[in-house]
Image (tube, rainbow, N blue to C red):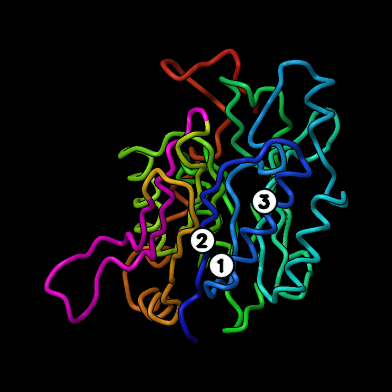
Amino acid sequence: MNNIRVALLQILPAGTLEENKEKGKNACRKAKEMGADIALFPEMWNCGYLIPENPDELKALSVSKRSAFVSAYKELAQELNMAIGITYLEACDPLPRNTISLFDRHGNEVYTYAKVHTCDFGDECRLTPGDDFYVADLDTDKGIVKVGSMICYDREFPESARILMLKGAEILLVPNACPMEINRISQLRGRAYENMIGIATVNYPAGKPDCNGHSTAFDGIAYRPQDAGSRDTLIVEADESEGIFLADFPIDEMREYRGREVHGNAYRHPKKYGLLVSEEVAPPFVRQDARR
């Protein structure tokens, strides 16, 4: 199998739903011309990550999975013979969700994932959290690859990437909308290293409030037999500008690495981790706005 190429669509929202749809479709076409197997959007692309305080305005911005907006990318994926991870504010009761739907190169829905770890200390307190993480086989021209997703704040919890790894994911597709600085990028580096997993994260560029580009991809390969020491698993880091950035994941080497290295699931002791699923929250971590 050749490299799995993910196009990180680090692009600015255009304004209206229709303008975002057309700009996003054009970006996908360019990604295909650049040889992408998967095109990935930043968080909540349909509205450019807007979360109004007014519930009626919030619901008016949302679209369903079967809307014309989402269906346009389903059809485009089939037309381009390229997978597309389209993000949107999804219509849901009682309040919308922060969602990604992944369509394969045949236009089939691979999964639809809603953000589990909503930022309840901020505007996302007005969104409905997702309830599970999903992994599925993605059919590409270069063979089957197992993929899953986190969304933005999900990355700050080791459990997100860990459960996706345990479910078999090889590459994680991560939409984002926040300032990407050394600590947040380091979290992604850590998630890739400890799970021996590929992670592709796409952010909005500078020009979008509270965002600064720096989309990244990590292949998770920390050691190579031919190298004397460890290597940085970073394979691409974008600058702050608007553009399409390509991440090539050496999937065969990633699989070989997983088959011989010591991280991931080989030496874990799950029976000793019971506290990880406890609902108790003790000081100093008690927060009145937290949802369970």
Residue type indicated by callout 3: Lys
Q: Are marks 3 and 1 in contact (CB under 8 Å)?
A: no
Outermost residue, bottom direction?
1
Quadrant of the image for the C terminus?
Answer: top right
Q: Secondary structure at mark 2?
A: helix
Q: Position of residue 272 (x, y in %)?
A: 43, 48
Q: Position of residue 6 (x, y in %)?
A: 52, 66
Residue occupied by mark 1 = 168
Q: Are marks 3 and 2 in contact (CB under 8 Å)?
A: no
Residue occupied by mark 3 = 23
The tag on residue 165 is 2
Q: Which residues are magenta?
A: 209-238
Q: Is residue 227 magenta?
A: yes
Q: Secondary structure at mark 1?
A: loop
Q: From the viewer's perspective, is 46 left or right of 68?
A: left
Residue type indicated by callout 2: Met
Q: CA distance from mark 2 to mark 1?
A: 5 Å
Vertical relation: 53 (above or below) 51: above
Q: Within 10 angstroms of label 2, few (less than 14), some, or many (20 or more) residues?
A: many
Q: Are marks 2 and 1 in contact (CB under 8 Å)?
A: yes
Vertical relation: 78 (above or below) 111: below
- Residue 105 in view: yes
